Amino acid sequence: MDQRGEESMEYAAEALASLPPRLVETARRYFDGQDPAHDWQHNLRVIALCERIGREEGADMTVLRLAALLHDIGRAEERRTGECHAEISAREAAVLLRDEGMDEGLIARVQSAILAHRYRKERPPVTREEQILFDADKLDSIGAIGVARAFAYSGVIGQPIHSDDPDQHTPAKEFEWKLSRLKDRLMTPAARRIAEERHRFMVQFFERWELELRGVR
């Protein structure tokens, strides 16, 4: 493992160590059976990125760590009901944080960050903590990890990895329609710097992908 990989693991470990152990274990159980694009490892990567960016950007780390830990706990219920996972996660987060005896003002800030991580026009990320969680979540959708997640999720929902049907969604179309645009939506300077290299790799990958599909390489 290279130095950056070790640092990322350390960031996640430090963040988790600062949180109530019961809360961490309860949050982890929400990810049992999740697809590989949205599993506990995804959560750990987002936590690590929040830790890295948050320290650089001067965030309230208590709010940010709690929001990162709990931002996707509604994924399983979203699959069952179709309700937005950010709204489910924010609602569940309040219950869990109250069980830990946390202040209502803190809970409201955590909920706001969770709701804003899934950017909608009516609720854009505004506070530093909201913006960092949004950025960290999107950074995990680009680069080598982003490519892997796109292909993994295609497998989960039964989509082909390639299709000549222009209406068929594929990882390459996910890149074209969404992933290629994410770096320009990031809000914090630290996240934008991280995104540059990840974006370049992703572009190079799909350029090579097209060449191999045509038998050129």
Image (cartoon, rainbow, N blue to C red):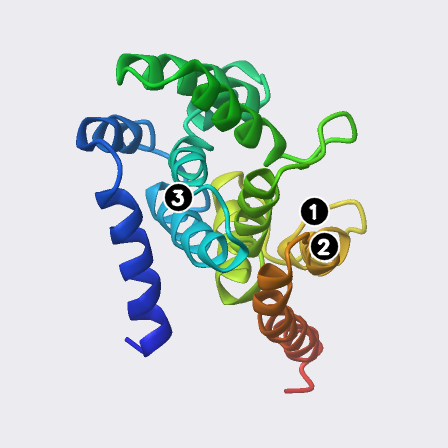
Find residue 104 and report its horizontal and vertical position in percent. 43, 14
- Residue under label 2, please give it: 173
Q: Residue at x 55, y 26 (%)?
A: 86
Frontmost residue, 52 versus 78: 52
Find residue 204 and report its horizontal and vertical position in percent. 65, 77
Tag shown at residue 43: 3
Q: Quadrant of residue 100?
A: top left
| Residue at the extreme left of the image, as rendered | 21
Provide the secondary structure element on which disc 3 rests: helix
Left or right of 199? Residue 58 is left
Mark toward the start of the polypeptide (3 vs 2)? 3
Q: Is residue 90 above or below residue 170?
A: above
| Residue at the extreme bottom of the image, as rendered | 217
At label 3, counting other C-alpha atoms closer than 10 Å, the crowd grade (few under 14, some 14-19, many 20 or more) is many
- Regarding residue 173, the answer to whether it shows in the image is yes
Left or right of 13? Residue 204 is right
Q: Is there CB contact under 8 Å for labels 1 and 2?
A: yes
Amino acid at dot 1: His
Mark toward the start of the polypeptide (3 vs 1)? 3
- Residue under label 1, please give it: 169
Mark nearest the camera among 3 and 2 is: 3
User: Label 1 vs label 2: CA separation?
Assistant: 6 Å
Provide the secondary structure element on which disc 2 rests: helix
Amino acid at dot 3: Asn
